[in-house]
Image: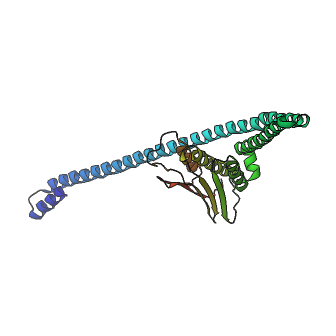
């Protein structure tokens, strides 16, 4: 700009020849052209650089999602295998033991009969618990029963343990998930939350509420335990696992905990079609 102004001034003062004017015009044109090329090159370079960064971020995101999916599939296969083993092997062994105990109760009397009857009842309760546990681990059973029924069964199973008083509340018009795998992931998140509640919270009550809305499902899990610092979560903890599962299905994960008050986890799940 300064060179152009000087050139314009010299022309107005008629202090340069025609040849000099032509030469200076070429110099100014060349300088401007070089500047335009440099600016264009710089802009193109920055765009390319930014695109490479975005591509790298997207690739990392896709890799992380695929890794989480693979981990979930492995976990489900493992849980399904355990569930089938509980039902087919241990369950059958308990059935045989219960039948033998009932047969023994018929041929004994007195104090021995009371003890045998008590043992038979314990075996019966254990068998029911094993069957309930096998259902909660087997993804095929959960798919067949449905989301609400599976959660209700899980609440009942927790109550049978006698360790905590739990309940479930369902509101709104039920929406059937088009993506069945999302049901399973949400179910596993609740299992993780309830397991952490039983292990660490010292809570007396556990509540689960489902609120079906038009475009999304609101799930709230709450306990009245001792609480903890949500900013000091250890790597590999159940909370991080729950957060990863929620991210996998695009669910908003909101965790709050206060000392002496308890812990609340709210999930907002937008219904997905894929």
Q: Position of residue 134 (x, y in %)?
A: 73, 41
- Front-lying residue, 257 or 183: 257
* Residue lying at 76% horizontally and 52% vertically, measured from the top left: 145
Residue at the extreme front: 110
Q: Is residue 123 above or below residue 16?
A: above
Residue 6 image point, x, y percent: 13, 58
Callout count:
0
Q: Is residue 253 visible?
A: no
Q: Is residue 17 left or right of residue 133?
A: left
Who's the residue at 64% across and 38% down the image?
Answer: 75
Regarding residue 80, the answer to whether it shows in the image is: yes
Q: Residue at x 35, y 48 (%)?
A: 41
Q: Is residue 160 left or right of residue 4?
A: right
Picture coordinates of residue 91, whole percent (x, y): 79, 37
Q: Give the quadrant of the N terminus.
A: bottom left
Residue nearest the viewer, comparing 104 with 22: 104
Q: How is the image coloured?
A: rainbow
User: Does residue 189 appear to the left or right of 176 in the view shown?
Assistant: left
Q: Position of residue 96 (x, y in %)?
A: 85, 34
Front one among 274 and 253: 253
Instruction: Tell me which corner region of the image, top left, top right, bottom left or bottom right, holds residue 118.
Output: top right
């Amino acid at each position: 700009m300064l060179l152009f102004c000087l050139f314009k001034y010299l022309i107005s003062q008629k202090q340069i020849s025609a040849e000099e004017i032509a030469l200076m015009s070429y110099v100014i044109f060349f300088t401007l052209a070089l500047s335009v090329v440099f600016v264009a090159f710089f802009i193109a370079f920055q765009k390319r650089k930014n695109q490479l960064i975005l591509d790298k971020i997207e690739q990392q995101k896709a890799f992380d999602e695929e890794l989480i999916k693979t981990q979930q599939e492995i976990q489900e296969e493992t849980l399904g295998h355990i569930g089938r083993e509980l039902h087919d092997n241990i369950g059958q062994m308990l059935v045989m033991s219960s039948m033998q105990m009932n047969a023994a109760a018929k041929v004994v009397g007195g104090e021995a009969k009371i003890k045998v009857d008590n043992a038979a009842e314990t075996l019966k309760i254990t068998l029911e618990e094993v069957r309930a546990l096998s259902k909660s681990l087997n993804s095929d059973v959960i798919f067949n029963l449905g989301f609400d029924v599976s959660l209700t069964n899980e609440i009942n199973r927790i109550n049978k343990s006698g360790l905590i008083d739990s309940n479930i509340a369902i509101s709104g018009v039920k929406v059937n998930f088009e993506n069945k795998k999302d049901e399973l992931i949400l179910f596993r998140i609740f299992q993780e939350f309830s397991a952490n509640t039983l292990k660490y919270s010292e809570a007396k009550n556990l509540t689960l509420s489902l609120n079906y809305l038009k475009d999304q499902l609101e799930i709230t899990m709450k306990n009245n335990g001792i609480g903890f610092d949500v900013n000091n979560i250890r790597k590999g903890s159940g909370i991080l696992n729950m957060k990863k599962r929620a991210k996998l299905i695009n669910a908003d994960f909101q965790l709050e905990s206060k000392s002496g008050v308890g812990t609340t986890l709210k999930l907002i799940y937008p219904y997905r079609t894929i």
